[in-house]
Image (cartoon, rainbow, N blue to C red):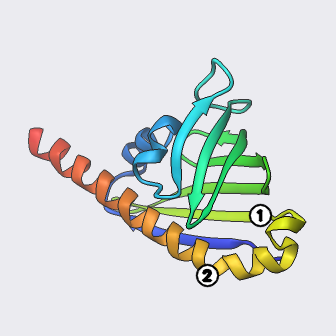
């Protein structure tokens, strides 16, 4: 199944956006489907960081076990999903003048009891809608912070 891709332009410089996104523990503040994150490693960022994320999508609640597999400061954060739903995802940041283009791509595989490939395909529009909403929240969070930062200068 092809992946799900969403993107947003954030009116803040890439370093400011990365400083927010690299704090994995705060992802629950802008991801409506992420209820709680519990780290499984002492390390909180970078390749090898592992954590559990309680994920809720409608009536479906599961614990997603994730590991950071790619980490390039101010550019990319990649994860593997090792729980009930498996796959991989990637955040990519690109500077565009004084703004940042934030891209999110996920490739997920569902077990047979969640519909397997048919369940994954059926979930695409719902997940795309949730993740677009997540990115709107992230954009608002960062732009509000960036506005306050600029006002203090």
**Residue 136 in the image, given as x and y percentages of width and height:** 38, 66
Badge 2 or badge 1: first in the primary sequence: 1
**Residue 50 in the image, given as x and y percentages of width and height:** 70, 32
**In-front residue for pair 142/50:** 50
Toward the front, the furthest residue is: 59
Task: Write the residue at 66% across / 37% down.
Answer: 52
**In-front residue for pair 96/104:** 104
| Occupied quadrant, residue 4 | bottom right
The kind of secondary structure element at disc 1 is: strand
Q: Residues within 10 Å of mark 2 (few under 14, many from 20)?
A: few
| Occupied quadrant, residue 57 | bottom right
Image quarter where the N terminus lies is bottom right
Task: Write the residue at 76% across / 49% down.
Answer: 81
**Residue 73 in the image, given as x and y percentages of width and height:** 57, 39
Task: Write the residue at 47% across / 55% down.
Answer: 31
Task: Write the residue at 71% across / 42% down.
Answer: 66
Residue 75: assigned label: none
The kind of secondary structure element at disc 2 is: helix
Residue marked by disc 2: 125
Residue 108: assigned label: 1
- Is residue 44 something that shows in the picture? yes
Question: Relative to 39, does residue 127 appear above or below in the rendering?
Answer: below
């Amino acid at each position: 199944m092809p992946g799900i891709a969403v993107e947003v332009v954030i009116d803040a410089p890439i370093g400011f956006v990365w400083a927010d996104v690299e704090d994995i523990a705060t992802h629950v503040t802008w991801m409506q489907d992420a209820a709680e994150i519990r780290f499984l490693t002492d390390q909180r960022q970078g390749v090898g960081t592992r954590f559990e994320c309680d994920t809720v999508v409608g009536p479906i609640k599961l614990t997603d076990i994730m590991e950071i597999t790619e980490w390039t400061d101010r550019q990319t954060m990649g994860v593997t999903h090792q729980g009930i739903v498996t796959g991989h995802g990637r955040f990519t940041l690109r500077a565009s003048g004084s703004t940042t283009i934030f891209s999110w791509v996920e490739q997920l595989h569902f077990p047979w009891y969640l519909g397997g490939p048919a369940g994954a395909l059926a979930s695409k529009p719902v997940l795309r809608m949730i993740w677009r909403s997540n990115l709107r929240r992230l954009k608002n969070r960062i732009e509000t912070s960036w506005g306050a930062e600029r006002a203090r200068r």
